[in-house]
Image: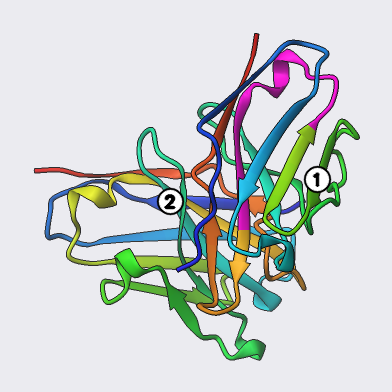
Amino acid sequence: SYVLTQPPSVSVAPGQTARIPCGGNNIGSKTVHWYQQRPGQAPVLVVYDDGVRPSGIPERFSGSNSEHTATLTISRVEAGDEADYYCQVWDSSSDHYVFGIGTKVTVL
Amino acid sequence: EVQLVESGGGLVKPGGSLRLSCAASGFTFSSAWMSWVRQAPGRGLEWVGRIKSRTDGGTTDYAAPVTGRCTISRDDSRKMLFLQLNSLKTEDTAVYYCSTGGVGRYLTFDYWGPGLLVTVSS
């Protein structure tokens, strides 16, 4: 089955840029989606189709996808961005949905 | 406004069964593909299974850890989604979320319920 790889944690100072990588075999050929999950809350879709923001998501959130790594970028990080972030794809070979293990973003 | 609200769950003994329900509103439920996603305590998100809309065949697919033990069904007339999980194991302990991409969106989870804790323990 398809596997997505994320670092367990990323730390960033307020006002700086956080980059969260998501790796997978030939991930550039897939469409990647990103979710933010604050403690005790349900996940929220923050980027879909590699780099599209849903309505209501700040422009500070952006996404990109290349051959082996997709990246969620959070610019001008704020304390409220502290959360777990998950990448997700649909694996066409199995017709299943796959999540990465999640990356905890800590704002220093 | 899209709303998904799970019910059921609680404490269940190993080997037992659970049936969760999800009440949907705010969108054309009959046209949406619906999924269950779970999250074990302190762990990441895990897709459990999906049911397609009736017009797309109404078929179901399940993740490997629950295949053979899990049945997802829907009642479009009541806008309800169901999850039946049998032969429960302690590793089925998790918060279970009802989720969907909404109408016409099949690859993302745009909307989520608040989640429901299921604890499998003797």
The residue labelled by disc 1 is: A63
Q: Residue furthest left?
A: B122
**Residue drawn where x is 54% and y is 42% of the image:** B114
Q: In which chain is the residue bearing label 1?
A: A
| Residue B79 can be seen in this image | no
| Residue A58 can be seen in this image | yes
A64 to the left or right of B96: right
Task: From the top left corner, tell me how far across and down residue B92 is, in percent.
Answer: 27, 52
Query: Quick check: marks 1 and 2 in contact, CB under 8 Å?
Result: no
A93 to the left or right of B1: left
**Residue drawn where x is 86% and y is 52% of the image:** A52
In the rendered image, residue A84 lying in the magenta stretch gets the answer yes
Which amino acid is tagged 2?
Arg
Task: From the top left corner, tell me how far across and down residue A51 is, in percent.
Answer: 83, 51
The residue labelled by disc 2 is: B38
Residue A92, disc: none
Q: Which residues are magenta?
A: A74-88
**Residue drawn where x is 39% and y is 65% of the image:** B83
A108 vs B88, nearest the viewer: A108
A85 to the left or right of B60: right
- Residue at mark 1 to residue at mark 2: CA–CA distance: 25 Å
Q: Tell me the element at label 1.
A: strand
Q: How is the image coloured?
A: rainbow
Task: From the top left corner, tell me how far across and down residue A58 is, in percent.
Answer: 87, 33
A8 to the left or right of B4: left
